Image: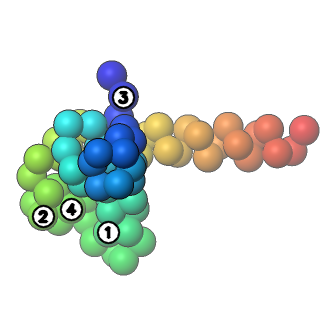
Amino acid sequence: MSLVVSDPHVLWGTPVFQGTRVPAETLFLYLEEGESIDTFLHDFPNVSRELALRSLRSAGGALIDAELHADR
């Protein structure tokens, strides 16, 4: 299952959490502003905790992989 999808018919192709119209970037903006994941989930109840956490883990893994490959 995809965590984040992009469809030109949903928010002009903005990457959103699967099954929602919530931009994935919104979670990162909340965290950047010092908000908790609980606040994000309260404000966007159609994003499950599991989906948000899996997305964070995936992004973290991608960042680590990118850093590892950049050193080669």
Disc 4 is placed on an element classified as: helix
Between the residue at mark 1 and the residue at mark 2, the CA separation in whole angstroms equals 10 Å
Residue 71, percent from left and from top: 86, 44
Between circles 3 and 4, the one closer to the viewer is 3
Q: Residue 46: percent from the left, percent from the top?
A: 11, 47
The CA span between labels 3 and 4 is 20 Å
Q: What residue lies at 52% left-to-right and 45% top-to-bottom?
A: 60
Q: Which residue is mark 3?
A: 2
The kind of residue tagged 3 is Ser
Sequence-wise, the earlier of marks 1 and 2 is 1
Q: Is residue 28 left or right of residue 52?
A: right
Is residue 10 shown left or right of residue 42?
A: right
Amino acid carrying mark 1 in the image:
Tyr
- The secondary element bearing badge 2 is classed as helix
Q: CA distance from mark 2 to mark 4?
A: 5 Å
Q: Are marks 1 and 2 in contact (CB under 8 Å)?
A: yes
Q: Which residue is mark 1?
A: 30
- Dot 3 or dot 4, earlier in sequence: 3
Q: Which residue is mark 2?
A: 43
Disc 4 marks which amino acid? Phe
Residue marked by disc 4: 40
> Alpha-carbon neighbours of circle 1 within 10 Å: few (<14), some, or many (≥20)?
some
In which quadrant will I find the C terminus?
top right
Pick the quarter of the image with the N terminus: top left
Residue 70 in view, yes or no: yes
Q: Secondary structure at mark 3?
A: loop
Q: Nearer the viewer, mark 3 or mark 2?
A: 3
